[in-house]
Amino acid sequence: MPAATGHRSAVPKVTFCTPPIAVAATGLQHGAMTQPRRLFEPLNLAALLTLGAVAFSMRYYEPGRQATAWLLLGLFAVGFLSLSLWPPRLRRVEHTVVALLPVIALALIALDPKPGTAPILLVVWIAAAFSHWPPRVATIALVLADVVYYLILKHIAGFGAPLMVVLIFAGFQAFAALCMHYARSAERTRDALSRVNADLLATRALLADSARDAERLRVARELHDVAGHKLTAMRLNLRALVDEPALADNPQLRVAEQLSGELLADIRDVVQAMREPGGLDLATALRALAAPMPRPLLRLSIADDVQVTDPALADAVLRLVQEALTNAAKHADADTLDVTLHRAGDVLHVTIEDDGLVREDWREGNGIAGMRERLAALRGRVRLARNARGAMRIEAELPA
C-alpha cells in the first residue's frame, strides 16, 4: 500500500542540484563570492576614491616625472584590484602582489614627496595586507614600510619633522588595520556559524526521519498487538456463531464473518508494510548541509538501491560530503561538486568529484585525517587522488 510504504521507496533515483544562495556579506575569503561581485566590495570602492584623489594631485608633480608617476599609480591600482580576482590556487601570486604594493607606493613617494598625497596609498595597502596576511606578518611589514617612509622624508624630501609625519600616517594605517582585522574576525565567526547551522540542519533532518520511522514502527506494533488481537477474537466469535445450527442460515452473520477476515488480512498487510525499513532521507540532509554555501554547487545522484537505515552510516556520509564541500570551496576554487551514491552488494559506494584545480603538492590535513578515522570506525575506507583534469576525486566504501 503506498500510504504505508512511504514516498522514499517509490522513487527509483534521485538526481538534483542544490542552487547557490545569495549572501549579503563577503562569505569565505576565497571562493564564497563571484569575482565580479568582489570587485565592488567597500574596500575596493574606497580604494578607487583614494586613487582618484592621488591621481588628481599628479598635476603638481614635476613635468619630467609625471609619466613615471602615472605608471606607478597605474601599477598600484591594477595590483590592488587584482587581489579580488586571484583564485585560491594562485594564492602565492596574490601574496606576491601584496608584498609589491608598498614598494610601488614608496617609489611613488620618493619620486616627488612634496604633494604629500601618495603616502595615503600605504593606508590602502595595509588594509589589503591585514586582509590577506596574518596580523603578525602584516604588522612587521607595516613597521618596515614606515621606516622606509621615514628615511625618504628625512634624506630625500628634507622634512624638518619626518617622525611626526610618519606617526600621523601610522595612525591612519593602524585604524585601517584594526578595521580590517575586526572585519575578518566577523567574517570568520559568521562562516563558522553558517557551517554549524548547516550541520544542525542536516542532523535535524536525519533525526526527524529517524523519529518518523520509529513512530511508524510504534503504530505498526499497536495495530498488531491491539487491533489485530481484538479482530482475531471477534472473528472467532463470529465463526462460532455461524457454526450454530440455529444461525447457520443467517446471511448477515456470514457477511460479518467474511468482512472481519478481510479486515484482519488488510491490517496485517498494513503492519507488514509499515515494518519495512524506508531508510533515512540522505538527500534532504545533504541538501541542508550544502545550502548555506554559495559555492560549490552540489549535484547529487542517489541510485534506487541505496537505502541507509543506520544513523551512524548516514552521519559518516554527511561528514564525508561536508569535508569535500569545504575543501572544494577553500582549496580548489570549484564551482560544482558531484556526489554519487550507489550500492554494489553489501557495500555503499560514495564518489565525490569537483571541477576545481588542486595543487600537485597537496597534502592531507586534519579534516581528511578525521574523515579516514570516521570511516575506519565503520569498517570503511576512502581514497583520494587528483583526476586527469587536476581536480580532487574521493572514493569511499562503507558496509551497507
Image: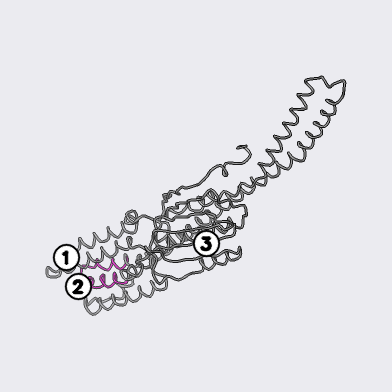
Considering only vertical position in the picture, is 140 above or below 327? below
Point out which mark residue 60 bears: 1
Determine which residue is flagged by label 2: 111
Nearer to the camera, 391 or 296: 391
Q: Residue at x 51, y 50 (%)?
A: 303
- Position of 253 compared to 343: left or right? right
Determine which residue is flagged by label 3: 396
The overriding secondary structure of the stretch rendered in magenta is: helix
| Span colored in magenta | 99-123
Kind of element beneath mark 3: strand
Marker count (numbered)? 3
Give the mark, 1 or 3, whose residue is nearer the N terminus. 1
Taking the magenta stretch, the answer to whether it contains residue 105 is yes
Q: Position of residue 392 (x, y in %)?
A: 43, 63
Q: Which label lies toward us, 3 or 2? A: 3
Q: Amino acid at mark 2?
A: Leu
Distance of mark 2 from mark 1, alpha carbons?
A: 12 Å
Kind of element beneath mark 1: helix
Considering only vertical position in the picture, is 249 above or below 91? above
Q: Amino acid at mark 1?
A: Tyr
Distance of mark 1 from mark 3, alpha carbons?
A: 66 Å
Distance of mark 3 from mark 2, alpha carbons?
A: 60 Å
Mark 1 Cα-neighbour bin, 10 Å: few <14, some 14–19, many ≥20 = few
Considering only vertical position in the picture, is 225 above or below 309? above
